Amino acid sequence: MGGQASSRMVSVRRCHTAELSADELAEVRALCSLAYGGFSDEDWAHALGGMHALAVDGGGLVAHGSLVMRRLLHGERSLRCGYVEAVATHPDRRRQGLGAAVLTSLEGLAPAYDVLALCSSAEGRSLYEARGWGLWRGPTAVLSPAGPVATPDEDSVYVLGGVDLDLDGPLACDWRDGDVW
């Protein structure tokens, strides 16, 4: 892992939510809460039901990310989207290449989807941009139970891959409780 400042050996394991024990799930949630300064029940629910990449060393879990199935609507097309959630690195282990290692594992699943997407914090943007993720410049919306609702404050949606995507065109995500992006 490039840029790793620690001599500790780190391995990345990829598995489905169903393969994680209750203790492992609790450890992932605790890491996310620590890394984000809080992690709501809705945020947690968004991270479940797909594939997880867990970076571990001798001392336990040091980084995590998950990839869950979502639908995005772009133009006239409904896209199978692998949506990245809960990318978290232990605060004491940041800037050591662990986030990149987790993303490398998740990006390896890209062939199963039309596109990968995520919504980044300001802190994470440089990581995604350095890996070739493109910032969505067009208008965003959510397909809510009441119909399409614009999400003009979402200026940090990134995509990777995808055929014939117009990054300046409209993009809508499927509905979910909590943060829709």
Image (cartoon, grey):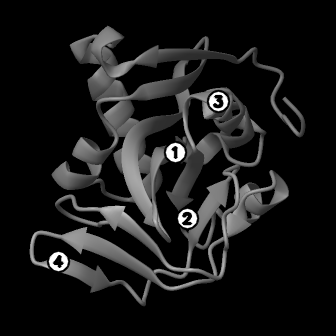
Left or right: 166 in relation to 140: right
> For the view shown, which residue lies furthest in the bottom direction?
152
Q: Circle 2 — which element?
A: loop
Q: Quadrant of residue 96?
A: top right
Secondary element type, mark 3: helix
Residue drawn at point x = 63 percent, y = 58 percent: 159
Amino acid carrying mark 4 in the image: Gly
Amino acid type of the residue tagged 2 in the rendering: Ser
Name the disc covering residue 111, or none: 3
Amino acid type at circle 3 is Pro
Q: Quadrant of the C terminus?
A: bottom left
For the residues labelled 3 and 4, the Cα–Cα distance comes to 30 Å
Q: How many residues crowd mark 3 within 10 Å: few (<14), some (14–19), many (20+)? A: few
Find the distance from the CA under tag 2 to the CA under tag 4. Answer: 25 Å
- Considering every residue shown, the one lying at the far right of the view is 2
- Residue 21: x and y in percent read 28, 10
State the separation of the CA atoms marked 1 and 4. 32 Å
- Distance between the alpha carbons at the discs numbered 2 and 3: 22 Å
Residue, disc 4: 147
Q: Nearer the viewer, residue 101 or 108?
A: 108
